[in-house]
């Protein structure tokens, strides 16, 4: 049910149990502060299960991003539309050791192409905490346009970044 996508360096695939240690370590890190973290192992397990459940409920979701050569998990990227969100989002998280290699950009381009080309969506946002400077930089690199902020009851003010349409530029 969950498709596997490939880029030059990455595989976007369903999460597996052997990804849990890397995922739990990331979710326990201070880097998750902009999304309500850090989280303990129990919470990380529930969140990983929710990633899989999102696919079952919505028919799309986030992938585990893995190094194409080693299959080691390097992050989570994909389509996300939880209850209370203004519209579907392209979301990304890169694990600590994988930061700075352009993985989020590469995976986000592929996930965005999937949304436009396979799902035939015409628009897509990313909701970014304004204090998450790396995600703000990635939204800009993806040619997103900043729109009015979104006030979330748990995460506070999130800036909405509108992705270019499929016609305007998919890397």
Image: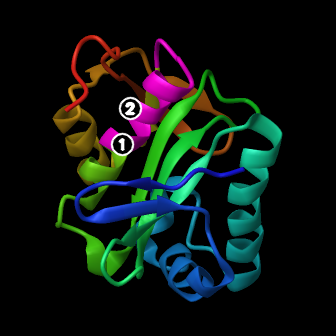
Q: Identify residue for label 2.
A: 113
Asked if labels 2 and 1 touch by Cβ distance under 8 angstroms, the answer is: yes
Question: Where residue 35 sits in the image (x, y, percent)?
Answer: 53, 55
Quarter of the view holding residue 161: top left
How many numbered circles does the render carry? 2
**Closer to us: 115 or 6:** 6
Question: Where residue 79 sits in the image (x, y, percent)?
Answer: 55, 40
Specify start and end residues of the magenta stretch as a single range.
109-123
In the image, residue 10 sits, relative to residue 81, either above or below, namely below
In the image, residue 152 sits, relative to residue 15, either above or below, namely above
**Closer to us: 102 or 84:** 102
Local packing at callout 1 (Cα closer than 10 Å; few below 14, some 14-19, many 20+) is many
**Identity of the residue drawn at 48% across and 77% down:** 26
Q: CA distance from mark 1 to mark 2?
A: 5 Å
**Closer to us: 18 or 91:** 18
In the image, residue 34 sits, relative to residue 165, either above or below, namely below
Q: Secondary structure at mark 1?
A: helix
Q: How is the image coloured?
A: rainbow
Q: Left or right of 92: which side holds 97?
A: left
Quadrant location of the C terminus in the rendered image: top left
**Identity of the residue drawn at 73% across and 75% down:** 45
Question: Where residue 137 sits in the image (x, y, percent)?
Answer: 20, 43
Q: Left or right of 27: which side holds 136?
A: left
Q: Left or right of 126: which side holds 52?
A: right
Q: Secondary structure at mark 2?
A: helix
Q: Identify residue for label 1.
A: 110
**Identity of the residue drawn at 21% across and 20% down:** 169
Determine if the magenta segment contains residue 113: yes
Local packing at callout 2 (Cα closer than 10 Å; few below 14, some 14-19, many 20+) is some
Question: Where residue 107 sits in the image (x, y, percent)?
Answer: 34, 51
Quarter of the view holding residue 104: bottom left
């Amino acid at each position: 049910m969950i498709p596997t996508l490939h880029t030059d360096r990455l595989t976007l695939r369903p999460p597996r149990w052997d990804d849990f240690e890397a995922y739990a370590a990331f979710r326990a890190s201070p880097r998750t502060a902009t999304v309500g973290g850090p989280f303990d192992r129990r919470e990380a397990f529930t969140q990983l299960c929710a990633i899989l459940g999102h696919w079952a409920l919505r028919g799309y979701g986030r992938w585990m991003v893995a190094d194409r050569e080693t299959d080691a998990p390097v992050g989570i990227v994909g389509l996300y539309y939880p209850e209370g969100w203004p519209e579907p989002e392209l979301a990304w998280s890169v694990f600590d050791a994988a930061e700075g290699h352009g993985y989020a950009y590469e995976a986000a381009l592929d996930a965005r192409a999937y949304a436009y080309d396979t799902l035939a969506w015409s628009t897509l946002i990313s909701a970014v905490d304004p204090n998450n400077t790396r995600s703000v930089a990635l939204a800009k690199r993806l040619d997103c346009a900043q729109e009015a902020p979104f006030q979330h009851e748990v995460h506070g003010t999130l800036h909405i970044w509108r992705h270019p349409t499929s016609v305007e530029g998919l890397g």
